[in-house]
Amino acid sequence: MKILVTGGAGYIGSHTVLSLLNNDFDVIVYDNLSNANIESIRRVENLTGKKVSFIKGDIQDKATLTKVFSEFVIDAVIHFAALKAVGESSTLPLKYYQNNVHGTLNLLEVMMAFRVYDFIFSSSATVYGGENVVPYEETMPLGEASSPYGASKVMIERALKDLAQANSEFRAVCLRYFNPIGAHESGDIGEDPKGIPNNLLPYVAQVAVGKRESLQVFGNDYSTQDGTCERDYLHVMDLAEGHVSAVNWLKKNSSFTGVEAFNLGTGRAISVLEIINAFEQACQQKIPYHFAPRRYGDLPAFWANAEKANKQLGWKATRNISQMMADTWRWQSNNPQGYPN
Ligand code: NAD
Ligand code: WQD
């Protein structure tokens, strides 16, 4: 089975490509490398001993997408390609809507033209907004997204529903990720943010490796156990395996049409201070940090009810927090500057 993976050179994409290859899928990666390094694909090939067809292209470029769909017989698409910096999306909303929403519509149009109907979409816990009570369940209505980035995910989920209503052959799975962290246990591939990391774990790891001085902990006056925010962190390899489960689920359920959403999380939340503590255990050193004001838009605590993915996809996150920290540290200490340029 041949799968087109957009954004496959990025953080979650590269780990998923590795899992797909290890499960004997053929993979074509389509990525414009705006937030990735081709070295991730080379390393995935080394780790798996298998080849990936790589095309440097933009999802906004219909001509190149059309060429790819004419050249390869594609059975399904896993769509990671997106811009993901939440803060930046508020200052550059049109860039985010162009890239994420317009780019996805382009891709779907080309898929329809080539009668490719199976689609797995990288959605996010952010679609639940701030209105729903935790833990989040798939039956809850989508919330009011707090950023253009979040809104782009809500819009795409809606577009997928409308497309499925209009076209009975179209089948989509929306995987709503909670907070992916960690790296492949080899330490050869991992998260390599450009510039100052926006997310907690890459920032902590860069402090540990001496690239940054001190971590700011955004807020210590939340109504949580220790006053810092709580999140449902899951290992990126568990998340990668979730995509393999979703592809297999579509394959097995040939009569399914429509759109189905699944939360991918552990079902447990842990705090920023607990993360720092666990990372200190993994790297055997103190992480300098200081408390800073709350970050705009942060919710105090959220986590997944991941029962549906367990029951229907047969998927469950199995790696614990110390493994997430150990693998992050292995990647960061082996690659202090990220992938070589
Ligand atoms: P990433 O930035 O590492 O990966 C995204 C990839 O898409 C990059 O390789 C980038 O070069 C590529 N890309 C971006 N725009 C493109 C375009 N127009 N055409 C072709 N390629 C393009 O990010 P990630 O963390 O791996 O996230 C993957 C997906 O998962 C994204 O859709 C993101 O919104 C979603 N997601 C991520 C998180 C998270 O915390 N990392 C959480 C929930 C959802
Ligand atoms: C986690 C916690 C911060 C950095 C974001 C997106 C979400 C999803 C995942 C894509 C929070 C705190 C962070 C730092 C800190 N992405 N923190 N100091 O905000 O839960 O989710 O990424 O869909 O949509 O919003 O993740 O890693 O940014 O933050 O104290 O330097 O760490 O306040 O409580 P978040 P995060």
Image (cartoon, rainbow, N blue to C red):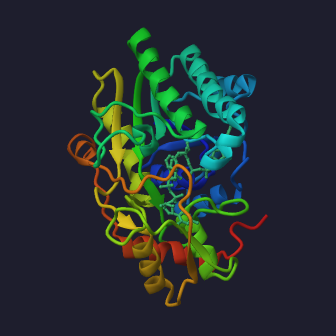
Q: In the rendering, at what x and y percent does residue 199 appear?
A: 57, 60
Q: In the rendering, at what x and y percent does residue 70 appear?
A: 65, 23
Work out which residue is located at the far top of the displayed protein and give it.
166
Residue at image point 70% right, 78% down: 211
User: In the visual, does 288 lie left or right of 246?
Assistant: right
User: In the visual, does 133 lie left or right of 17?
Assistant: left
Q: Check the image and report above or below for 74 versus 296.
A: above
Q: In the rendering, at what x and y percent does residue 246 appear?
A: 36, 40
Q: Visible in this render: residue 133?
A: yes
Quarter of the rendering occupied by the C terminus = bottom right
Q: Visible in this render: residue 75?
A: no
Residue at image point 42% right, 40% down: 129
318 and 1: which is toward the camera: 318
Work out which residue is located at the far right of the displayed protein and give it.
341
Residue at image point 63% right, 51% down: 9
Residue at image point 67% right, 83% down: 210
- Asked which quadrant contains residue 125, the reply is top left
Work out which residue is located at the far left of the displayed protein and give it.
311
140 and 178: which is toward the camera: 140
103 and 128: which is toward the camera: 128
Q: In the rendering, at what x and y percent does residue 340 appear?
A: 75, 67
